[in-house]
């Protein structure tokens, strides 16, 4: 079954080129050219991933992302201006899964889409991988892509779930940012890439604290991040 991709960008010529390439690569693609139409399509639940441009008239990509995240955890890949760190960080804070700087090639975009979808799909490797993971008050069910803290459901983006799963499987040990990027994002960590830091900051706000009042997610100097194992 083909993965359905939602392209939200007002650059008709560019998204037409992306659409043609993605269809040749086996994807089913729908194009819309403004944020309102993109939000409506995202809420249909028909898509595997959305590609969202930051710079659009009327309702820009960041506002579109904010509205989509009120009612959907659809994986979202942002298209940002090269060197525009502010839009990238804000987009990640609002719940984007990853970003690609424009101009980018269709091949680069396709590779990033596949990395996100590969991590978002729940295909258990064996019975051990399918079992629940419990670390303190955190419980994760990787096969169902569900997580809870103290019995309460956690609303996580696809990338947040991936990163938390990596940390949970290594609870009590620091995990490097490069390992988190490789295993959680499906790509090597780029130089000056703040992606992991922003996602982990978001996770800290969604997770609870341990008995002594500290966040259960700790930064380990020069080593990475660690999920505290009580």
Image: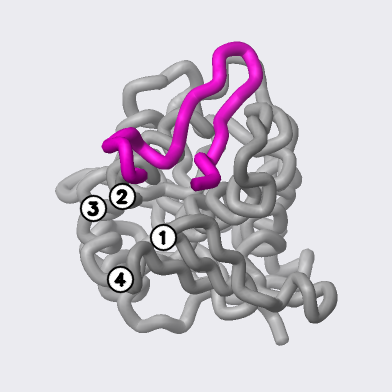
Relative placement, left or right, of 40 versus 18 is left
Q: Position of residue 194 (x, y in %)?
A: 49, 24
Q: Is residue 218 magenta?
A: yes
Q: Secondary structure at mark 4?
A: strand
Q: Earlier in the sequence, mark 2 or mark 4?
A: 4
Query: Quick one: quadrant of the N terminus?
Result: bottom right
Q: Nearer the viewer, mark 3 or mark 1?
A: 1
Q: Residue at x 21, y 59 (%)?
A: 67
Q: Earlier in the sequence, mark 3 or mark 2?
A: 3
Q: Earlier in the sequence, mark 4 or mark 1?
A: 1
**Residues at discs 3 and 2 in contact (Cβ within 8 Å):** no
Q: Residues within 10 Å of mark 3 (few under 14, many from 20)?
A: some
Q: CA distance from mark 2 to mark 1?
A: 8 Å
Q: Secondary structure at mark 3?
A: helix
- Per the image, the residue denoted by label 3 is 66
Furthest-bottom residue in this view: 1
- Per the image, the residue denoted by label 2 is 208
Magenta stretch: give its range.
210-230
User: Which label sits on residue 137?
Assistant: 1
Q: Residues within 10 Å of mark 1 (few under 14, many from 20)?
A: some
Q: CA distance from mark 2 to mark 4?
A: 11 Å
**Residues at discs 2 and 1 in contact (Cβ within 8 Å):** yes
Q: Position of residue 73 (x, y in %)?
A: 39, 66
């Amino acid at each position: 079954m083909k993965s359905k991709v939602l392209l939200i960008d007002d650059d008709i010529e560019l998204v037409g080129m992306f659409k043609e390439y993605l269809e040749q690569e086996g994807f089913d693609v729908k194009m819309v050219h403004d944020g309102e139409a993109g939000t409506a399509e995202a809420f249909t639940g028909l898509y595997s991933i959305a590609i969202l441009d930051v710079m659009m008239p009327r309702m820009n990509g960041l506002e579109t992302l904010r509205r989509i995240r009120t009612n959907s955890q659809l994986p979202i890949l942002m298209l940002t201006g090269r060197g525009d760190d502010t839009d990238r960080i804000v987009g990640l804070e609002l719940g984007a899964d990853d970003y690609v700087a424009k101009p980018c090639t269709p091949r680069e975009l396709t590779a990033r889409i596949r990395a996100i979808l590969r991590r978002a799909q729940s295909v258990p490797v064996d019975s051990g991988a399918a079992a629940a993971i419990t670390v303190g008050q955190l419980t994760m069910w990787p096969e169902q892509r569900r997580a809870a803290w103290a019995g309460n459901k956690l609303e996580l983006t696809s990338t947040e779930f991936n990163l938390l799963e990596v940390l949970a499987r290594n609870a009590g040990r620091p995990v490097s940012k490069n390992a988190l990027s490789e295993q959680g994002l499906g790509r090597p960590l780029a130089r000056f890439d703040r992606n992991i830091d922003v996602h982990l900051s978001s996770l800290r706000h969604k997770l609870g604290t341990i008995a002594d009042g500290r966040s259960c997610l700790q930064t380990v100097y020069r080593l990475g991040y660690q999920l505290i194992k009580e």
